[in-house]
Image (tube, grey):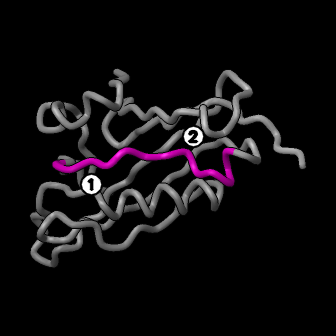
Amino acid sequence: MRVPSFFIVMLVPALATCLARAGSGAETLAVHVVGLDYPRQAHMAAVQGTVELEIAIRGDGTVGTIKTLSGNGLLAGAASETLKTWRFSPCADPDGACRYLMTLHFVLKGGPLDISQCKTKFAFDSPGVITVESQFAKAIFD
């Protein structure tokens, strides 16, 4: 199910914006979500692809460490920086180090447009899977 990003704030508690805990089947819910922007450098270079991350959630629901398991560095870096601002339901692990897997698909479709006209949309496809989509950008010549 793809959900337009403008619905995210209202639907977060009820939507499958959860992450499956690595190796356990336990889940956590995202309670504060900040939109993901397509990274400008990746956008201009027409970089697309899938990024897989392992996210450590602390006992208070804040994001601890984020480990890139696979994917382009430009895409993974931008995703990690944004995910650090998200908040989740508290980790129930006594050590406070619950680890969750997240997959992000970065896709460029349509265009090319001036970079200032390229809008980014993101959608939760399923628990722990997000698609970040924008348009191809025109090359800049001096």
Tell me which residue sits at (37%, 23%) in the image: 2
Q: Foreground: 37 or 138? A: 138
Find the distance from the CA under tag 2 to the CA under tag 1.
23 Å
Query: Is residue 33 in view?
Result: yes
Q: Is residue 51 left or right of residue 111?
A: left
Q: Foreground: 99 or 114? A: 114
Q: Residue furthest right?
A: 142
Numbered mark located on residue 107 in the image: none
Three-letter amino acid code at disc 1?
Arg
Tell me which residue sits at (57%, 40%) in the image: 106
- Structural crowding at the residue carrying mark 2, measured as other residues with C-alpha within 10 Å and reported as few (<14), some (14–19) or many (≥20): many
In the rendered structure, does residue 76 fall within the stretch colored magenta?
no
Q: Foreground: 40 or 31? A: 40
In the rendered structure, does residue 39 fall within the stretch colored magenta?
yes
Tell me which residue sits at (60%, 32%) in the image: 117
x%, y% of residue 25?
23, 48
- Structural crowding at the residue carrying mark 1, measured as other residues with C-alpha within 10 Å and reported as few (<14), some (14–19) or many (≥20): many
In the displayed structure, 133 sits above or below 80; it is above
Three-letter amino acid code at disc 2?
Phe
Check disc 1 and report the residue beneath it. 21
x%, y% of residue 4?
35, 25
x%, y% of residue 26?
19, 51
In the displayed structure, 94 sits above or below 49; it is below
Query: Is residue 27 in view?
Result: no
Q: Quadrant of the N terminus?
A: top left
The region drawn magenta spans: 31-43
Check disc 2 and report the residue beneath it. 106
